Amino acid sequence: MPGTTRPPVSGHPAISLRRVAANGIEINVAVAGNGPAVLLLHGFPHTWRLWTEVIPVLARHHRVIAPDLRGLGATTRAADGYDAGTLATDAEELLTALGEPSAAVVGIDAGAPPAFLLAMRRPERVRRLVLMESSLGPLPGAEDFLASGPPWWFGFHAVPGLAETVLAGHEAEYIDWFLTAGTRGRGVPREIRDAFIGAYTGSEALRCAFSYYRAAPANARQIQDAAGSRRLTVPTMAIGAHPVGTALERQLRPVADDLTGHLVEDCGHIIPLDRPDALLPLLTSFFAPALR
């Protein structure tokens, strides 16, 4: 198997961590199970551990691949390449390096735009697509969600050098705000919370995280170009919760040939940790055709 394999994850013996060279960086990736591949792409402020409750169930019938995205967690803190198009190439080359010709691809938050672009640009590599709690740049349909403008932190993160300077020494308090808000006050398990805070502590870690927001204009152009030149032919499921709701589904409806939408009630933005009990039946049912 390509890459460097490390011991199983503490408390999760079925999950192994590997470092895999792809698209000019070293990607830290959690791998578990056997069967048709499922690629899980997290967002901010997460790492692969966002999927801790999801991986063991999916791994019963699938080979689950959950990377730390470029610059985040234990993946290379690259100088650039945080636009959705480059991240989509990261994902494709990771699949290639792991010997997977195709996968069901799941993206949430900042992981959704690269998942979308991968499916649009290379549909033969994406068997099924799941997008959660995100918006797709300028595509129509999210006007209600964005009626008061983007969430406040988008502008704060977008100013080069500002947020990482202001937040130095206060990373834990800042990340805690997102974890609490993203679970409607319920919070996440202490072990996962500590892993997230560790991953986003330090000016270089923050620079990489905020580079995702600084790439927003490039993402908008890439998404607009893709949607203007082709259809989304891959079977797709849009899953919303609070605060995005059905906005993502409405954005996808005009460009997707085969779209299913779900709204998870009483659930915050961080669906895989807040309501895995509601998410897992949706995923396992949607992925079931690959097992027949």
Image: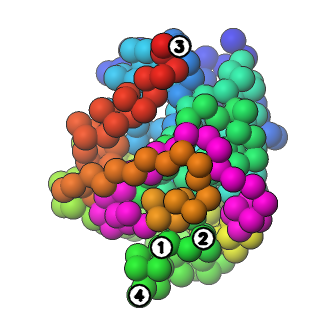
Q: Please, what secondary structure does the residue beneath circle 4 have?
A: loop
Counting residues from the start of the chain, the first of labels 2 and 4 encountered is 2
Residue 27 visible: no
Residue that badge 3 annotates? 35
Q: Amino acid at mark 2?
A: Leu
Q: Which mark is residue 142?
A: 1
Indicate the position of residue 161 as horizontal and vertical percent values: 63, 76
3D distance between C-alphas at marks 2 and 4: 17 Å
Residue that badge 2 annotates? 139
Q: Nearer the viewer, residue 132 or 165?
A: 132
Asked whether the residues under the numbered discs 1 and 2 touch, taking CB atoms below 8 Å apart as contact, a structural biologist would say yes
3D distance between C-alphas at marks 1 and 2: 8 Å
Q: Amino acid at mark 4?
A: Ser
- The magenta stretch spans residue 233: yes
Q: Please, what secondary structure does the residue beneath circle 1 have?
A: loop
Mark 4, Cα crowd under 10 Å, few <14 / some 14-19 / many 20+, is few
Residue that badge 4 annotates? 148
